[in-house]
Amino acid sequence: MTTRYSEIIFWAIQYFTFCLFIIGLYFVLDKRLKVFRIQLSTHSHLNLYAQDALICLVLVLITGIRCNNGSDYYNYWVMYSEVTDWYSNIGDVLEEKFQNGYLLLCYVTKALGGGKYSIFWVVSVLIYFSTIRLFRRYSCSPVLSFACWVLFGYLTMSTNIIKQSLAMTCILWAFFCLERKRYVQFCCLSLLGCMFHISMVCVVFIMLFFRWLHPSITFYKIIMVVSIAMYILITPLLEQVSQFLPVHYAVYTQAYLDDSMNDIKLQIGGIVVAIFYIIILWDITKKHNATKSVSRINNHLLMISLLCIPFLIIGIKFYLCNRVAYSGLQFLTVLLPSYYSFTRQKHMSFISFKKYIMVLVFSVLFTILCAENNYYQYSTILNDKPMSVYDFSIRRQQ
């Protein structure tokens, strides 16, 4: 056990060092490289950012060749390897009623001649290019948004919970389509996100009906009270509701509930994550209300994030709810640069410095907690082969 945790901490330090390196590299490249402007027509043009492409390329190369990173790697590999044996055409794939988006992506990739590990390359390209492109387009500081995305754990998630990460990418773009009144694109991206992971239904619902509320200090306090009440009531409520759910969903719900209640490490991890985001959201809400002129989009981004606090706190007991929470809290990566940008501060106060340190400490802790889920492994397809978590655990004990 001691050896295992020493390996976890050592891996966390290595991974955190890589995070700082990739963020620093992006910062340097963003200052030095030029933007290539391509004129498409008289009234339109396309900006190509070499720094974005280089950072994406680095991430794709590192994650594309990974092997056995995370507890779900083997399952995703099996689905990709055998998808054409399971289904004879795309229609059969679409008949799957539960989160068929990843299977569809696997089938298309395989049908187009994808190799043994092509799905991981395809997923990496889709997630990283889409995310960085969105930051470049909608964030006031793309590099700082990228730094938040990495340090908040979304890069780590993208190497294991692939369906969730693909779904979150779709929903992030869907939000900005909704804000720009591109309703067809919003519907398509929302549907695609829900096909990858059903938890996106909750986020889409919040975006459609609740983003117009005002994120005041009073609203924050109300949300906290409601969240604590729901935390207390969630276990008996879910036990009752699961009796009326279809068998698949009932088993899924009960399994997650049992795991969360019996695994103290999951609960500790949930508490660490909840405390971090509660502090961040409290500070942003105060800054937001103290600002005289606030953009409509920033108002909506903060409101969606605040409405994810209940899912975050309930996730301490029932960690499936964290899937919804992370999907909504990812909007903070676009919002935070508006309030914490280095370029907007003539000097850094001690309080501001402590906030940056808090983010770094959270990143290390989050990495260590994720390592409990077999993240503390980076091998490549050049020197390893996919294996189940059980076989992986046996190998490490030998």
Image: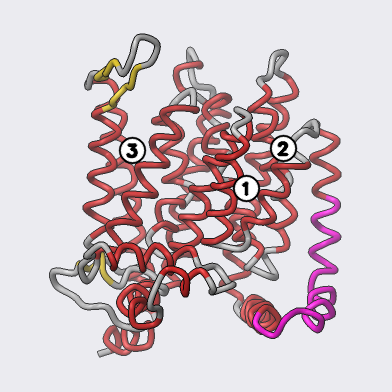
The residue under label 2 is 303
Q: Residue at x 32, y 22 (%)?
A: 47
Q: Is residue 216 above or below residue 323?
A: above
Give the prevailing secondary structure in the magenta stretch. Answer: helix
Mark 3 is on which residue type? Ile
In percent of width and height, residue 346 lies at: 48, 12
**Quarter the N terminus occupies:** bottom left
In percent of width and height, residue 123 lies at: 35, 56
Q: Using the numbered discs, state the Cα–Cα distance from disc 3 to disc 2 in whole angstroms.
A: 28 Å
Mark 2 is on which residue type? Met
The residue under label 3 is 23
Q: Nearer the viewer, residue 143 or 40?
A: 40
Q: Using the numbered discs, state the Cα–Cα distance from disc 3 to disc 1 in whole angstroms.
A: 23 Å
In percent of width and height, residue 151 lies at: 44, 46
Q: Is residue 202 above or below residue 71?
A: above
**Residue 176 image-quadrant placement:** top right
Q: Is residue 235 magenta?
A: yes
Q: Is residue 68 magenta?
A: no
Q: Is residue 380 above or below residue 224?
A: below
N-terminal of the pair, mark 3 or mark 1, is: 3
**Residue 249 image-quadrant placement:** bottom right
Q: Secondary structure at mark 2?
A: helix
Please indicate whether residue 50 sits to the left or right of residue 329 in the image.
Answer: left
